[in-house]
Amino acid sequence: MIVVPVLCGLGIGLALWLGVRALAPSPPSLAGALADLERPRPLRNPQERAATRAAVSAGIGARVAAMAAAAGVEVGPRLRADLELAGRSYERYLIEKVAAAGYGLILPAAVHVVLAVVGVQVPVGVVLVGAGLLMVGGFFLPDVVLRTQVQERRRDFDHAFALYLELVSLVLAGGGGIETSLLEAAETGDGWAFQQIRAALGAARLTGRTPWEAFGELGERLRISTLEELAASVSLAGEQGAKVRASLTAKAASLREHEVREAEADAESASERMTIPLVMLLFGFVVFIGYPAVIRVLSSL
């Protein structure tokens, strides 16, 4: 029983000694300093260091992905669309899941060792149960983070696409053609959503497809219902310019109304959340005021 506290004490002592040496290092010798100045060093800029870290991370992620594929784990279309929408690779996603699970597994053991050093005994069963729960929670934590990022990305894309359709309607009102209006409106923005729109329009021009087919494919790949609905409505309108223009205008108005309703819902939700602290504050104030009176009444009985 005394071995664990002794080892922990030695580890803490070594850490303190290393910390003192790091904060107050001994002065180097003159010969060593001159030799260090004359030693050639490779020039590496921040881009090269970032590329090196990315390469190492990609290599580790590729190995983890190969192990997952060997175990029969496959990437579904929904997960692939979410990762592409969030701008994350499958390898990085796997690394985050494994790292979070490992951290959740090690954390209770580290806390148990620290408590044992200070004299607090925690049952081993509690540590094992906590490690298992934290490991499972850490394994699924990247899924929750990814889902939150994807929801924000889809909301941002809907806002940007509503603005894009408004710009298309303005160019159409100025006498421009449909394809010209689509291209000119796509060139006005520089965000992620506008980059995706420009890429889809450029691919459509190279392959000889209509912009609506490109929008439908992009919406299906990224699982964005706004693009799929627009592609379906325009395909139903046919090839007539007036009907296509009416479909674009109606879709822009629909998206604008949806944004207004969404903003109102967020404001109402924020107002409802603010009532909880106010109610708790009022309850605490009532308890603080009424506590002496209640104690006096109870003591007089």
Image: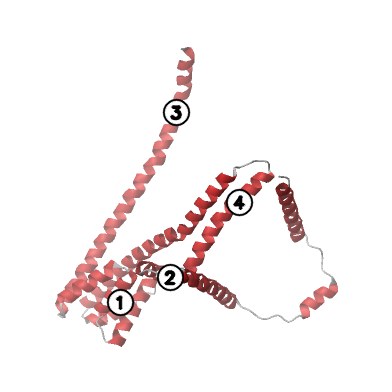
Does the rendering let one see residue 166? Answer: no
Do callouts 2 and 1 mark residues in contact (Cβ within 8 Å)? no
Q: Secondary structure at mark 4?
A: helix
Q: Residue at 45% across / 58% down in the picture?
A: 140
Residue 185 is tagged as 1
Upstream in sequence: badge 4 or badge 3? 4
96 vs 9, left or right, is left
Residue 87 is tagged as 2
Q: Residues within 10 Å of mark 3 (few under 14, many from 20)?
A: few
Residue 6 in the image, given as x and y percentages of width and height: 74, 49
Do callouts 3 and 2 mark residues in contact (Cβ within 8 Å)? no
Tell me the mark number nearer the camera, choosing from 2 and 1: 2
Q: Residue furthest front?
A: 71
Upstream in sequence: badge 1 or badge 3? 1
Tell me the mark number nearer the camera, choosing from 3 and 2: 2
Q: Secondary structure at mark 1?
A: helix
Do callouts 2 and 4 mark residues in contact (Cβ within 8 Å)? no
Q: Residue at 66% across / 45% down in the picture?
A: 116
Task: Give how far apart the Cα atoms at labels 2 and 4 are.
Answer: 35 Å
Task: Give how far apart the Cα atoms at labels 1 and 3 are.
Answer: 61 Å
Tell me the mark number nearer the camera, choosing from 4 and 3: 4
Question: Amino acid under label 3?
Answer: Val
Question: Amino acid under label 4?
Answer: Ala
Task: Give how far apart the Cα atoms at labels 3 and 2 are.
Answer: 51 Å
Task: Give how far apart the Cα atoms at labels 1 and 4 are.
Answer: 57 Å
Question: Amino acid under label 2?
Answer: Gly
Q: Nearer the viewer, residue 114 or 258?
A: 114
Residue that numbered label 4 is attached to: 109
Question: Amino acid under label 1?
Answer: Ala
Tell me the mark number nearer the camera, choosing from 1 and 4: 4
Residue that numbered label 3 is attached to: 287
